[in-house]
Amino acid sequence: MQLAFLASGLSEAQNAKKKLQAAYGKVTPAKADVLAVLGGDGFMLSSLHKYGHLGKPLFGMKLGKVGFLMNRFTEDDVAERVSKAQAVDLKPLQMTTTDPDGHQTQALAINEVSLWRQTNQAAHLRISINDIIRIPELMADGVLLSTAAGSTAYNLSAHGPILPLGTEALALTPISPFRPRRWRGAVLPNKTRVTVEVLNHKKRPVNATADSDEVADVVRVDMHLRQDIYYRLLFDPDHSLEERVLNEQFL
């Protein structure tokens, strides 16, 4: 088994990369069987976006502040751990934004797509589900659509529901909502198409973000889960992603 080691900019991760390459050799991501990612969740997400097209599984080891998508770090028996690891396939959301001139931009999100107000003016948003208007006007700081894997990230901070993997659902969660006051979001089937239209965009501009890809001044955002794309993560059998999602609901 050939391992390619990817490290974040943290000194701990860079030092670990040098030691692991000395033990297992230097292999490029394109020639590796597995990509070993050293860092935190942010670096794992950027690695998925950068190397996901290679179709290689990724095995993360935590050397950062947040490690929900990572395994514990050790320098010993890495190849053996990878060979015994369990795979979890994550499907991304596709975001298609439209600007005031009609120009469209597409991006993929493994965690969530979020819309945020750009100024001190609250965003006014119209939300449609499968082309049916469900909320004519949401007054809020914004709204986000999260995958199950991303439900414990920004979605949880916005008081959205945690979605155990395998539920085949998406979480639609408002960010600091004012009206409708009692709406706290929705759990949607993962084949749902969600459209958010920005009302009065000149006075109340909104940006949209797919993980770390940001588009400013959007008037419409269309979102759906890509059923034909997946990213494969590897986890130690005693520290699975499903178990972590479950544990988060009892903290």
Image: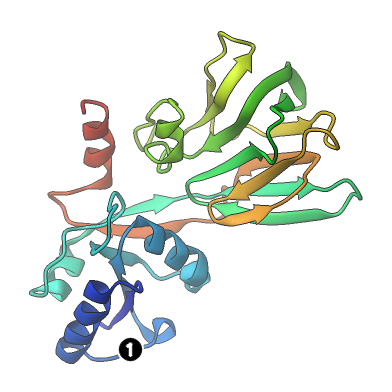
Q: Residue 86 is drawn in which quadrant? A: bottom left
Tell whether 193 sits left or right of 149: right
Tell whether 221 sits left or right of 31: right
| Image quadrant where one finds the C terminus | top left
Residue 50, compared with residue 172, is above or below; it is below
| Image quadrant where one finds the N terminus | bottom left
Residue in the picture at 82% in, 35% down = 201
Q: Residue 84 is drawn in which quadrant? A: bottom left
Residue in the picture at 78% in, 39% down = 220
Residue in the picture at 76% in, 19% down = 133
Total numbered labels? 1
Camera-side residue of 134 and 115: 115
Q: Residue furthest left?
A: 76
Q: Residue furthest right?
A: 101
Q: Locate residue 140, reporting x and y percent.
A: 63, 24
What secondary structure is marked by label 1?
Answer: loop
Q: How is the image coloured?
A: rainbow
Q: Locate residue 90, reporting x and y percent.
A: 43, 50
Residue 125, compared with residue 113, is above or below; it is above
Q: Locate residue 173, reporting x and y percent.
A: 53, 27
Q: Locate residue 131, reporting x and y percent.
A: 77, 27
Residue 210, compared with residue 44, is above or below; it is above
Around disc 1, counting alpha carbons within 10 Å, would you say few (fewer than 14), some (14 to 19), or many (20 or more)? some
Tell whether 236 sits left or right of 27: left
Residue in the picture at 21% in, 39% down = 243
As shown in the figure, which amino acid type bears the numbered disc 1?
Val
Q: Which residue is mark 1?
A: 27
Q: Residue 197 is drawn in which quadrant? A: top right
Q: Residue furthest top?
A: 182
